[in-house]
Amino acid sequence: MADEKELQQEKVEVREAFSEAEAAKERREEEKPKETVVEPDPESPAAEEKGSESTCEIVVAPAEGDRHTRARKQVEAARALVESADAEIEECIAKIRDDLAKFEAYEHASLEPVVEESRRLLSELGVGELPTGVVVSEVELENPAEERLEIEDLPSGKAGAFGWGFLVALLTLLGWYLYGASRAGLSPLPDRMPDLGFFSAIAGKISLLIDQAANPAVGAAIALGTALLAGWIVYAVLVAMRAAKNQRIAEEIAQEAGFYCRKKEECKEKMAQVREHLKELQRTVQKYQVLLDEKNAALRRALFVEDADSLEKLHQRSRQNVEEIQELLQELSRLLATPMAREGMLTKESTETLRRAKRVINDRILSLYS
């Protein structure tokens, strides 16, 4: 008699302890913020503060050289930041896919045999409308509409500047040629192939701009020197303009890369929620598997001992066991069929279904100690 009282007391204590633990866990989950992730405004102070604490700021060491060199360094730093953010996302996705693969392996090896046994036993009793399958629904870990940020190298503009400089130099020489020919009284388009004397006469007239006597060597030097100077000025101006433009573009790229990185950090947080949800899902599904396995054994015993071939011939307690198996199968099927993630974000339906499934299985576990 005393042993029976002690046994009853132990059952009551176990039930109370389990109830307190589950109640505390439920309270913690209810106190947590909703699973739905609210997109923060990237221009809000909170977002700016978060970005400053993250690794999404581009820090470029002082670079020697012109503005183009500094802009190139800034673009290289932005590209490295984007590549690092993409690599971290890929790592998160790979981990989740690995968890999913392990969970699917567990389903095929452990869960499906138990569920199929439950379905077989219920079919023998003529129970219809059984849930179909217990395969986890497809998980969409990436947003198909989101494109990766591709950063191209900045053009130096030197090739184009050289072409324009060369053209200006040729035009300058042409101008001197026309000027000298006009002063020398020669036709710019001679009837025959011009010889050295023809060009010497033109160069001599050009030299009169700085010398009283005609000097072809001086004239040629003036024409070539001014042509090269004009070409170099055009080249230098265009390269400087391109460098200034590159610096503005580099700053825009740096800002865009920082924003892209912050968006990827938000994606990482969402994927962390998906991964944690998957772990909690597996723990809950394992509870269903264990309890279903136990109830399958009880139903097999009932079918053998009671020699029943239909639901109506079973004892009342055995029929109650059948109802519990049906409920567990339905909840398990609903839980695994609910889409877990869309566009890389945990779905609200999945969190609500998991919460409901946990309440159902915990109630069933509590009933074992009542």
Image (tube, rainbow, N blue to C red):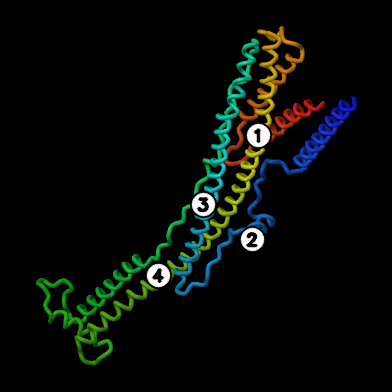
Residue denoted by label 2: 52
Q: Residue at x 78, y 29 (%)?
A: 366
Q: Amino acid at mark 4?
A: Val
Quadrant in the picture for residue 301? top right
Q: Amino acid at mark 3?
A: Ala
The tag earlier along the polypeptide, 4 or 2, is: 2
Quadrant in the picture for residue 236? bottom left
The tag earlier along the polypeptide, 3 or 1, is: 3
What distance separates the C-alpha of mark 3 from that of mark 2? 21 Å
Rendered-image quadrant of the C terminus: top right
Q: Amino acid at mark 2?
A: Ser
Quadrant in the picture for residue 369? top right
What distance separates the C-alpha of mark 4 from that of mark 3? 36 Å
Q: Secondary structure at mark 2?
A: helix
Callout 1: 10 Å neighbours few (<14), some, many (20+)?
Answer: many
Q: Secondary structure at mark 3?
A: helix
Residue denoted by label 4: 239
Q: Secondary structure at mark 4?
A: helix
Camera-side mark, 4 or 1: 1
- The percent coordinates of residue 267 (x first, y second) are 59, 47
Residue denoted by label 3: 87
What distance separates the C-alpha of mark 2 from that of mark 1? 33 Å
Which residue is more in the foreground, 288 or 157?
288
Circles 3, 1 touching at the beta carbon (< 8 Å): no
Q: Amino acid at mark 1?
A: Ser
Callout 3: 10 Å neighbours few (<14), some, many (20+)?
Answer: few
Which residue is more in the foreground, 290 or 38?
290
- The percent coordinates of residue 77 (x first, y second) are 50, 62
Residue denoted by label 1: 350
The tag earlier along the polypeptide, 4 or 1, is: 4
What distance separates the C-alpha of mark 3 from that of mark 1? 27 Å
Q: Secondary structure at mark 1?
A: helix
